[in-house]
């Protein structure tokens, strides 16, 4: 695992894809970690909207969501689904209906980018509305491509 992580870092430094270098377990772990970062950032924004609405915290969290959204697509290569022998909530539909899945991923990136822009305005009402749009985009993908826990 350490060897594949070092190789992945070396490839990333040259612009190559992490998913190519990593084992299925490492790739699944990376995407799960990214989703946890995204969830944590969503919680930061939710908490800020509930009280305080600190612009810098919301912008930082929105940037994390946008960065993780961009990172996720390459972390779903063939061979990293339920058949990989590693616990994952990813449904086989990701690989059998890749065009739809990729469409959801592009929509998440677009909505997350809008969240970054709106968070920079400091307008809590606008941030709240865009936060809901991002959450709806996440939920739409989860319904089609994620197993319920």
Image (cartoon, rainbow, N blue to C red):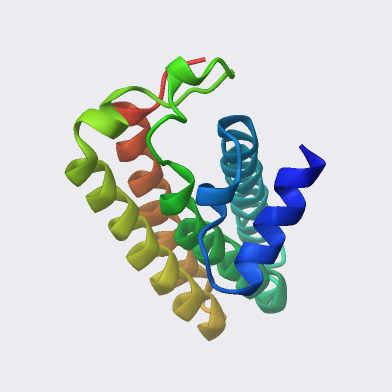
Residue name at image x 69 percent, y 65 percent: 10
> In the image as oriented, which residue stretches furthest toward the right?
2
Q: Is residue 55 left or right of residue 118?
A: right
Nearer-the-camera pick, 44 or 53: 44
The answer to whether 67 is drawn above or below residue 30 in the figure is below
Residue name at image x 81 percent, y 43 percent: 2
Q: Residue 81 location in percent, x, y?
A: 43, 25
Q: State which quadrant residue 68 falls in.
A: bottom right
The N terminus is located in which quarter?
Answer: top right
The answer to whether 40 is drawn above or below residue 147 in the figure is below
Nearer-the-camera pick, 7 or 72: 7
Q: Is residue 126 left or right of residue 88?
A: left
The answer to whether 59 is drawn above or below residue 80 in the figure is below
The answer to whether 70 is drawn above or below residue 22 in the figure is below
Nearer-the-camera pick, 139 or 94: 94
Residue name at image x 52 percent, y 48 percent: 19
Residue name at image x 60 percent, y 43 percent: 22
Q: Is residue 39 left or right of residue 147?
A: right
């Amino acid at each position: 695992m350490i060897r594949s992580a070092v190789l992945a870092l070396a490839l990333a430094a040259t612009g190559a894809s992490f998913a190519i270098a990593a084992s299925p377990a490492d790739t699944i772990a990376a995407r799960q970690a990214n989703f946890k970062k995204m969830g944590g950032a969503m919680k930061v924004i939710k908490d800020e909207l509930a009280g305080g609405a600190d612009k810098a915290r919301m912008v930082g969290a929105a940037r994390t969501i946008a960065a993780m959204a961009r990172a996720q697509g390459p972390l779903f290569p063939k061979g990293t689904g339920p058949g990989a022998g590693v616990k994952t909530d990813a449904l086989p539909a990701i690989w059998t209906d890749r065009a739809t899945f990729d469409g959801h991923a592009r929509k998440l990136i677009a909505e997350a980018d809008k969240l970054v822009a709106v968070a920079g305005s400091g307008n809590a009402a606008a941030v709240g509305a865009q936060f809901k749009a991002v959450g709806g985009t996440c939920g739409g993908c989860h319904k089609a491509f994620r197993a319920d826990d």
